[in-house]
Structures are given as structure tokens and as C-alpha cells.
Amino acid sequence: MNEEEFRSKLREWINNNAPQSLRGRKILFETVEFDNYDELRLWQRKLAEAGYLGITWPKEYGGQGLDPIYEVIAYEEFIRAGLPYGRSLGSIGLMVAAPAILKHGSDEQKKKYLPRILRAEDIWCQGFSEPQAGSDLASIKTKAEDKGDYFIVNGQKIWSSYAHLADYMILLARTGEDRYNGLTMFILNMKQEGIKVSPIHQMTGKSDFNTVYFNNAKIPKENIIGKIGEGWKVAMTVLNHERFTLGVTMLFTSKITLESLKNIKGLEEIEDEVEGLEAFYQRLLVKLRRGEEIDIEGSILKLVSSELLQKIYELAVMNYDVETIMKEKWYLGMLASRGRTIAGGTSEILRNLIGERVLKLPK
């Protein structure tokens, strides 16, 4: 099936299968609007059964084994329809845990976790950031102590989306003193003693983020992703995938949101910026069609798209009357957009990466 046939078939499937209650959402992310987690779980299972999730995954783990370009097309079409896709309730499993397990996990881990991630049978959260180690991820202090057949974990993580619902956490913890080689990636069972989850109340009114405390939580040795001391390498796999996916999502959210703005001063300039970013995005699609991986370009896409989306919502809130802002929920989009320049790496960190790796500037 070529790209156009895939796109046409997908559009037909969306028209025939997407529930009306989930259609046409134009706010930044589903976490802003959706409270019905059971409905989201059922929707994800429907997507998985239709073959529209895990598009690039090997077939033996529930995927379709297709090229990455087809996954990008799916993102485009579901976002265009205003439908949740690979985000919200199952996002950490699909965007964070699955790429790590696919590339670095054991065969047993792939068979056990990947099909359940696709069908939203297990919900995942992410244990990366800490109160003193957000942007500087390598400074984490949460410790996993080797006890022979298992590790004991003590410490604290923060900004863990859906930790209050999660069955598992993909956890980066310190197993040695070396800044980078002393890190290991784990799969942590969240349904055990020694774990306390405290919701963080956000300015959007939601509490999807959480602080997670570990007090002698237990992780069996078979739950290491990769090898002991290779956690930083696994984390980079996760972050590269997450940044590109976030970038694609925010680019198309920007396009959809921009279509809702009319006769506002400064609109033409933003339209030009969106057009320029889409041209860059089209270059990335050429790489995908060649079978090449997206590397630092994903950071560029995420950086520019997140700041562009923020501009769009600010423009709407600064120019519309209060009644329109409240009715159309522009204020929610503006509030939520602030976090998009932080998630997946702050704009400052991404500028450092681009400066060092693309422009070859000194650290």
C-alpha cells in the first residue's frame, strides 16, 4: 500500500469509526479537556485493533511493521480530525516506554509489555525528572541499590504524568557514581508497597502531573532495560523519539489552531512561520522515506513548534474579547502551551544541544 492509499483508507476509517464525543478537539492536548479515562482507554484499544497504533513495530509484538512515514501520516490525520492519537492516557507507554523496550529491551520484555501497551491494558508513567534534576537529567539522585536478585529504590521523581493511574513506570535511577555511566533504566511496578504518589495541581485545573516517592521499592533484575550503567543511552533513545513526536503533534496543532484565528493583527507573520516550519518538516519526511533516522532535527522541530504554538495562543488571548476566550477555551490552550516549552527538554536545553551538535559551539 502506498502513502496516498494508506491516507485515504485511514480517513475513511476515521469517518466511520471515530466516536462523536472525541471529535474536533482543538485545544492543545487531550489532558486539557478529557476526563473520561475509560472512554480514552476504549478508543486506544479500537485504534490498536484496527492497526493504527504501533505502525512501525514488528508484527510479533502487535505492530504492522511499516515504515515510519506511515506513522507520521497517522499523526497528521488524527490531529487534523481533532482526535486523540498516541497521546493522553496511553502516551507514556507509546511514546516513552515502548521505544526504549523496542530498541534496548529483552525479548521477554517485548513479548510481555508491548502488546499490553498498544491496547492500553497497562498505563505507564515516566520517572526521569527530580526536584534538583529537571533539565540537567544526568544529575538525578534517586538510587537503585543492587541486592543480588533485585534492586531496592529510594528517592523522588516529579512531573510524572498519570502516575496516579499507572501500572508501571519507566524509571531512570542511579546505580553508580559516574555521572552518565552510573545510570540504569528500569521497569518499576507501581502497584507495590513503598511507592507514594502525590498529585500536583496545575493552573489548568487538572492534576495529571505527580510527585512520586520511593521508600525501599523493589525491582527484579529482569526489569532492567538494556544493561546496568547504560541508562543514559536508553534515555537518549526515549528523548529523541519523544521530541520528534511532540514536534509533529505541535506543528499540526498549530496549523489547526491557526485556522480558527480570523482578522487578528500579527497573524500573517505567524502564518509565515508555520509555513516555514512545515517546509522543514517535509525535509524530515524525505529522510524517513530514505530509511534514515531522525536525530537532532527532532529537537529543532520540537523547539520551534512549541514556541510557535505558544505564540498562537497568546495572540488569540491578547486580541479576542473575554466572552470568546472563555467560550472557545483559548485560555486553557494558552495555559497548557506554557508546559510544551518544558516537556521533552526545555527550550534552553534544546538550544544548547543544537548549538553544540549542529553549530559546533563550545559547551
Image (tube, rainbow, N blue to C red):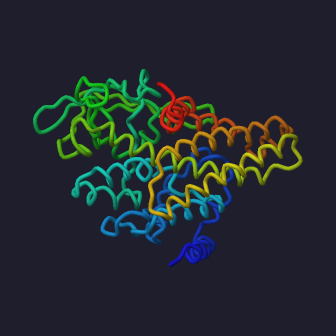
Q: Is residue 77 above or below residue 251?
A: below
Q: Looking at the image, which residue is at 61% across and 44% down? A: 32
Give the side of residue 227 with respect to residue 324, left or right.
Answer: left
Give the side of residue 189 with respect to residue 331, left or right.
Answer: left
Residue 205, horizontal then vertical, whole percent: 61, 35
Residue lying at the far front of the rendered structure: 360
Q: Looking at the image, which residue is at 39% across and 34% down? A: 128
- Can you tell which quarter of the image residue 233 is in? top left
Q: Is residue 167 above or below residue 56?
A: above
Q: Looking at the image, which residue is at 27% across and 38% down? A: 230
Residue 60, horizontal then vertical, whole percent: 30, 68
- Can you tell which quarter of the image residue 133 is in? top left
Q: Nearer the viewer, residue 121 or 97?
A: 97
Residue 81, horizontal then vertical, whole percent: 65, 62
Q: Nearer the viewer, residue 196 or 175?
A: 175
Residue 211, horizontal then vertical, whole percent: 43, 30
Q: Is residue 44 above or below residue 303?
A: below
Q: Looking at the image, which residue is at 38% across and 45% down? A: 237
Residue lying at the far top of the rendered structure: 132
- Can you tell which quarter of the image residue 171 is in? top left
Q: Nearer the viewer, residue 23 or 274?
A: 274
Give the side of residue 75 with respect to residue 316, left or right.
Answer: left
